[in-house]
Image (tube, helix red, strand yellow):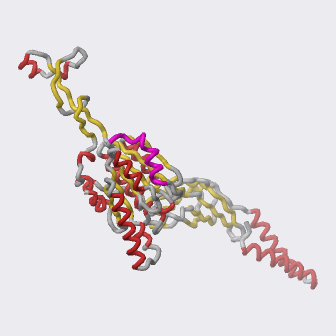
Amino acid sequence: MWTRKAAIMLAGGISLILVGMMISNFQMMIIGLTFISFISISAWISGHSELEITRYVPHSNVYKGDLIEISITITNNSYRRTQQIEIFDNVPHEMKIRRGINQMRLNLGPGQTTKLDYMLRCPLRGHYSVGPISVRYKNAFGLFVNESKIEDLCDITVFPQVRDVEDAMLRADVPKMYTGATTLRSPGPGMEFYSLREYLSTDSLRSINWKAFARTGDLMVNQKTRDAVTDVFVILDTREVSRIGTVLKNPLEMGASAAASIGSHFLKRKDSVAMVTYGSRMEFLPPDTGDKQQYKILSSLASVSPSGSMPLQAVTNSLAPRISRGSPVFIISSLEGDGTTIPAIRNLSGNGHEVIVLSPSSVDLERLVSRIPRMAYEVLKLERQNRLTAVSGFGAKVIDWMPDVELSQALMQSR
């Protein structure tokens, strides 16, 4: 690629030759030919070296707001100098550079190595790619530039923030729902004593109660209460209406953080958690336990975006055969623009489910980006309160989540 200096020099050389020919001035023609010859010789001398460029990223999975350290190593594997080289690492515009810089100008000798270190902050959840690395070489006289790209892409997943909600959960009215492995009052494999019964030939000798045998003379075995794991269903609203507010503060961002926090809390308590998102379509992650399920939940929440207008009742009707009886259901939605909310929650409560609705206040979030007259704001707040009251009248615990309230404090309202 020609630089502006080379273009000006070429134009000047041609002009000197033409003017010299017109006025028969050989000195001007020689100077013009000198300019053109100098450009031609510079074009032949490429001066390119064999560069080895590698990027190192310690963690490819981070949480929203975390910092990522990126290190790029540049090595000159040739026997001559590189002259002037510019290295530029392409960074997604959603990420912010907190320390260092993602570009460098250098001149490496044979076998020399240098490093480019910088730190990124990830303010938004999602899936991103850092790269490719752009390399620009400029020759010694600055007349020609060669650009190339190294397709070294580093995929980074930014999970939503996971808040600590344990204290809020422990203060709930129904602690049995949050105790992880729940004891059922029926015989089966477990830890707690249930009753005594006569010994059968299929019973293990370890289950014999020798004290009862010494007292009665008959072989008796211990029966234990059966343990079961609670299935917790988390339903997250990702409709188009969930984008109300700022980029960092809107119902979807608040809801994604709440869903990740609630799911992480129950998984730590050995419960089984299912995640459902609905917007343009419904995505269902079957209930499961363990760290693998938490990774699936966080990955699913990292990729959601506001779109569509699927009604809540369509989601609950589809989930009805999959939700185990008595399972608690968390619905995270602003409840805006959906007339099927009340019948959907009524059906869930009627089937014996404990329903908790965590509703980010879209009215207050809208005030962050637009100026709403006080009278209009009061009317919208009153309409929202009437909607939440109607929902709570069908057996659901409704939480009006304000933008400036922490998740753990909001969940304490469900007591």
- Which of the 4 image quadrants contains residue 398? bottom left
Does the segment drawn in magenta span residue 320?
Answer: yes
Q: Is residue 395 above or below residue 19?
A: above
| Quarter occupied by the N terminus | bottom right
Q: Is residue 68 above or below residue 144?
A: above
Residue 108: x, y in percent?
58, 62
Residue 334: x, y in percent?
41, 61
Q: Residue at image x 19%, y 22%?
A: 206
- Which of the 4 image quadrants contains residue 92? bottom right
Q: Is residue 149 visible?
A: yes
Residue sticking out furthest to the left: 215
Q: Is residue 66 visible?
A: no
Viewer-side residue, 92 vs 366: 366
Q: Residue at image x 37%, y 57%?
A: 258
Please state the extent of the stretch shown in magenta in the rendering.
Answer: 311-325
Does the segment drawn in magenta span residue 191?
Answer: no
Q: Residue at image x 36%, y 62%?
A: 388
- Which of the 4 image quadrants contains residue 82? bottom right
Horizontal arrangement in the rendering, residue 299 relative to residue 162 (left or right): right
Horizontal arrangement in the rendering, residue 130 relative to residue 322 (left or right): right
Viewer-side residue, 409 vs 88: 409
Viewer-side residue, 294 vs 141: 294
Residue 10: x, y in percent?
80, 74
Q: Residue at image x 23%, y 14%?
A: 201
